[in-house]
Amino acid sequence: MGKSTFEMLYAYNEDLATKGAPMVVGLNAKGDEIKFFIAKWANEKHEKEMLRRQKQLQASRYSKTRNTRIQCEMFADTILIGWENVLDTDGNDHPATRENKLAALIKFKDLRDQILEFSMDNMNYLAQDENPEAEDDTEKN
């Protein structure tokens, strides 16, 4: 027997959900594919961090700057796991340190929005063979 409708729609790969699914965003100046590794929204680590910071978030709700910083810190620590092929202004590798992730998240609202949307889409966290949009690299005879 196959999977139930709920399993097909809502079951996800825990490894991808916590270690991050690749989100391809384009090519860098060297022509290499840029990937961000995004953990699933409300993964266990993210939920714990939201609970831990609940009072800070409530206290910052009237300060957009402070609230944005707290949200970005949580993203940097629990959602944006890392990246590949991100370059600095000199064309050197820009490592995915907490500081670098936080700086990018604070500076670029569109980046935050894109990561949020990706992290909340369950389809990004299905196992490869379960994802109907995944490319099949095997030859068909």
Image: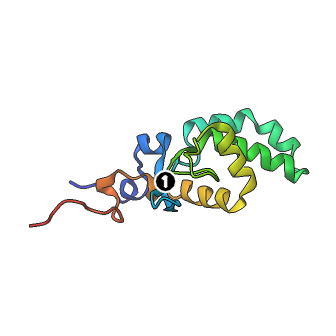
Q: Amino acid at mark 1?
A: Lys
The answer to whether residue 78 is left or right of residue 71 is left
- Position of the C terminus, as image quadrant, is bottom left
The image shows residue 30, relative to residue 102, as above or below, that is below
User: Residue 45: x percent and y percent?
Assistant: 58, 35
**Residue in front for this viewpoint, 20 or 83:** 83
Q: Residue at x 33, y 64 (%)?
A: 132
Q: Residue at x 19, y 59 (%)?
A: 138
User: Residue 23: x percent and y percent?
Assistant: 49, 56
Count residues near mark 1 (Cα–Cα under 10 Å), then give few for <14, some for 14-19, many for 20+. Answer: some
The image shows residue 95, relative to residue 117, as above or below, that is above
Q: Residue at x 31, y 63 (%)?
A: 135
- Position of the N terminus, as image quadrant, is bottom left
Rendered image quadrant of residue 137: bottom left
The image shows residue 15, relative to residue 132, as above or below, that is above
Tell me the residue that label 1 is attached to: 35
